[in-house]
């Protein structure tokens, strides 16, 4: 487990204006966020509070964790530059995305009395493992990436999700496959994780009789030949895989090496340029990747590029929004965990991805759109909005 503030002296950020709590509607293309004057990354010598980030900083899924950290840190840096007398620190907690590590990490977060809220957890499995502890402690959590559709049904009072879940993503992906690709048959493979199997099952349910073959893989295995042989024998026009980018690289490569020509379709766990598109190379070309995530507003993209010298990564905008929810309620006067939880429940403000407001079960009321991307000439590029 690693805790760090990750504030680097001398880093120069473009500061976005603080997103004030407000009422009223907003569409995805407009928010209260605008570019302000440049300001150096702030130091926080006398913080009024801390927020935590639980995510995969290291391990096989670290590529997906990096934008979670960068989005959260960008929000905190901007907040502290605008509020030097009421600054907040970001403390990071690495689970490697492993549900087995999540309870101990959660307890470390809970034991730090300065932490008033948590951004994350990053993945679905670790969310299900950690949320019982956070719920008992009354520590508000806001995930920008854990999409398993059963989390909100567990009765956790502190759970909040800022994007669409797999109950929206799975049917949307299936409808896109059936409508846009018009396959005669579909094959489905999953990695047996809470996330991957949940998403694959949602796609399977919506696709119905078109699904001709299914299988599961062991994500720790190097050889997926059993699943590859099953898909090759079934000869589907489309293969959907529910899982993460590491396994997607191996599966794509082994399918193509076996001569399988099916169009490959993935969920959000594969949307990583370096982790999937670059690593899989020619085997990734033409693959479709669905995600309930978007790049954010033009102002946000410019600020990110100024800060990190790269385009925003998957879920960077969602974690920026999630961190700002906590920062906003702390600025609004919430001084303890109970007050933060109550304020998050009532939150209603424009973020850079959507208007952010939570239903009683913690789901974002404005989170319904899924976005389809495609690997073209080696780059993951936007294709269409799908519902």
Image (cartoon, rainbow, N blue to C red):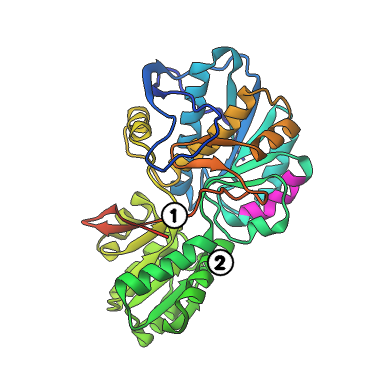
Q: Is residue 343 left or right of residue 191?
A: right
Q: Please name the residue shown 67% across and 49% down the image.
A: 360
Looking at the rendering, the stretch of residues picked out in magenta corresponds to 126-135
Q: Which mark's residue is nearer the viewer, 2 or 1?
A: 1
Drawn side of residue 196 relative to residue 109, left or right: left
Helix, strand, or loop for circle 2?
A: helix
> Which residue occupies the extreme right position in the image?
136
SS majority, magenta: helix
Q: Is residue 323 above or below residue 37?
A: below
Q: Which residue is mark 1?
A: 369
Instruction: Work out how far the residue at label 2 is from the one at label 1, CA to CA, in angstroms.
Output: 18 Å
Residue 7 horizontal/vertical position (percent): 50, 24
| Residue 293 percent coordinates (x, y) | 43, 49
Quadrant containing the N terminus is top right
Q: Which residue is mark 2?
A: 198
Number of disc labels: 2
Residue 60 x/y as whole percent: 48, 53
């Amino acid at each position: 487990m690693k805790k760090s503030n990750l504030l680097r002296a001398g880093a120069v950020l473009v500061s976005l204006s603080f997103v004030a709590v407000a009422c009223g509607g907003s569409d995805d293309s407009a928010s209260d966020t605008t570019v302000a004057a440049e300001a150096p990354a702030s130091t926080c010598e006398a913080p009024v509070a801390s927020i935590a980030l639980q995510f995969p900083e290291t391990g096989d899924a670290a590529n997906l964790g990096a934008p979670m950290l960068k989005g959260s840190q960008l929000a905190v840096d901007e907040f502290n530059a605008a509020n030097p007398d009421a600054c907040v620190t970001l403390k990071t907690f690495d689970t490697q995305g492993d549900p087995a590590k999540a309870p101990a990490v959660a307890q470390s977060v809970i034991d730090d009395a300065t932490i008033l809220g948590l951004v994350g957890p990053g993945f679905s499995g670790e969310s299900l493992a950690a949320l019982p502890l956070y719920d008992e402690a009354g520590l508000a959590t806001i995930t920008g990436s854990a999409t398993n559709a059963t989390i909100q049904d567990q009765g956790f009072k502190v759970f909040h999700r800022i994007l669409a879940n797999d109950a929206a993503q799975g049917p949307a992906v299936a409808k896109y496959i059936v409508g846009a690709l018009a396959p005669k048959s579909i094959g489905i493979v999953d990695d047996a994780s809470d996330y991957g199997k949940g998403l694959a099952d949602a796609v399977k349910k919506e696709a119905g009789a078109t699904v001709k073959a299914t299988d599961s893989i062991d994500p720790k295995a190097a050889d997926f030949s059993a699943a590859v042989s099953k898909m090759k024998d079934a000869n589907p026009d489309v293969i959907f895989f529910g899982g993460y980018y590491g396994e997607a690289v191996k599966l794509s490569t082994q399918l193509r090496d076996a001569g399988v020509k099916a169009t490959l379709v993935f969920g959000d766990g594969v949307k990583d340029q370096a982790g999937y598109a670059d690593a899989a190379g020619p085997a990734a070309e033409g693959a479709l990747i669905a995600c309930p995530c978007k790049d954010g507003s033009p102002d946000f993209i410019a600020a990110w590029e100024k800060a990190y010298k790269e385009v925003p990564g998957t879920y960077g905008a969602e974690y920026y929004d999630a961190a700002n929810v906590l920062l906003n309620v702390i600025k609004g006067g919430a001084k303890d965990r109970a007050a933060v939880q109550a304020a998050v429940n009532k939150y209603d403000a424009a973020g850079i991805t959507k208007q952010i407001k939570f239903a009683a079960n913690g789901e974002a009321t404005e989170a319904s759109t899924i976005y389809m991307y495609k690997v073209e000439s080696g780059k993951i590029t936007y294709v269409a909005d799908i519902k």
